[in-house]
Image (cartoon, rainbow, N blue to C red):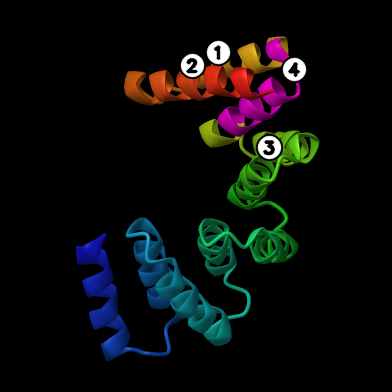
Amino acid sequence: PENAQLAYSEAIGLAPRISIAYVNRGAAYNDMKQYDNAVEDLNEAIRLDPKEVLAYINRAVAHAELGQPDQAKQNYDEAIRLDPLDAWAYSGRGGLHLRTGEYELAVQDNEEAIRLNPRHSLAYVNRALAYTYLGKDEEARQDIEKVGTLGIGSILMTAFEASIEEAKKRR
């Protein structure tokens, strides 16, 4: 992420009016857990191009990590308003609903993400966790099986299964 941040900083120095450079540097800042810097860059990206969906999604991630769920939701909502076919916006908002304990809403948003992109493994992961918190173990099991068929890798699958077990303990 540090190399990406440096490369995008150089690009911004050469062409400061190109919004995607700010979007990408903001994403790099998110990866580096520098969420305040990410928000600053993503604000600039949106100022330059208010229809840049990825800027809203990345800014939502930063706000969520900063403990600002209302701002995160507003950004996901705006991304969905701008592009109602963006599966990542729905799965992101669904993940936010998981964090805030709104499990039915998490199921709904992740179902929409899956409808838009049936191979969206993160949406299945989020929905399985929401189902688990709701006590719908059979539905969660089906999503777990689906994730396994999407080829996410054994290490990620093991981590996912551990998250499901942890969710069962918390409900």
Q: Secondary structure at mark 3?
A: helix
Looking at the rendered structure, the kind of residue marked 3 is: Asn
Looking at the rendered structure, the kind of residue marked 2 is: Thr
In percent of the image, x 80 and y 34: which residue is there? 104
Q: Judge left or right: residue 14 versus residue 153.
A: left
Looking at the rendered structure, the kind of residue marked 4 is: Gly
N-terminal of the pair, mark 3 or mark 4, is 3
Is residue 6 positioned above or below 161 on the image?
below
Looking at the rendered structure, the kind of residue marked 1 is: Glu
Q: Are marks 4 and 2 in contact (CB under 8 Å)?
A: no
Q: Position of residue 41 (x, y in %)?
A: 44, 78
Instruction: Indicate which label's residue lies in the foreground, 1 or 4.
Output: 4
Q: CA distance from mark 1 to mark 3?
A: 16 Å
Residue under label 3, please give it: 110
Marker disc for residue 135? 4
Instruction: Indicate which label's residue lies in the foreground, 3 or 4.
Output: 4
Marker disc for residue 145? 1
Q: Are marks 1 and 4 in contact (CB under 8 Å)?
A: no
Range shown magenta: 124-137
Tell me the quarter of the image containing the C terminus.
top right
Q: CA distance from mark 1 to mark 4?
A: 17 Å
Q: CA distance from mark 3 to mark 4?
A: 17 Å
Q: CA distance from mark 3 to mark 2?
A: 18 Å
Instruction: Indicate which label's residue lies in the foreground, 3 or 2.
Output: 3
In percent of the image, x 62 and y 18: which residue is there? 168
Tell whether position 165 is magenta. Answer: no
Q: Secondary structure at mark 2?
A: helix
In percent of the image, x 64 and y 13: which residue is there? 142
Q: Judge left or right: residue 134 versus residue 17.
A: right
Residue under label 2, please give it: 149
Q: Judge left or right: residue 115 versus residue 92.
A: right
Q: CA distance from mark 4 to mark 2?
A: 23 Å
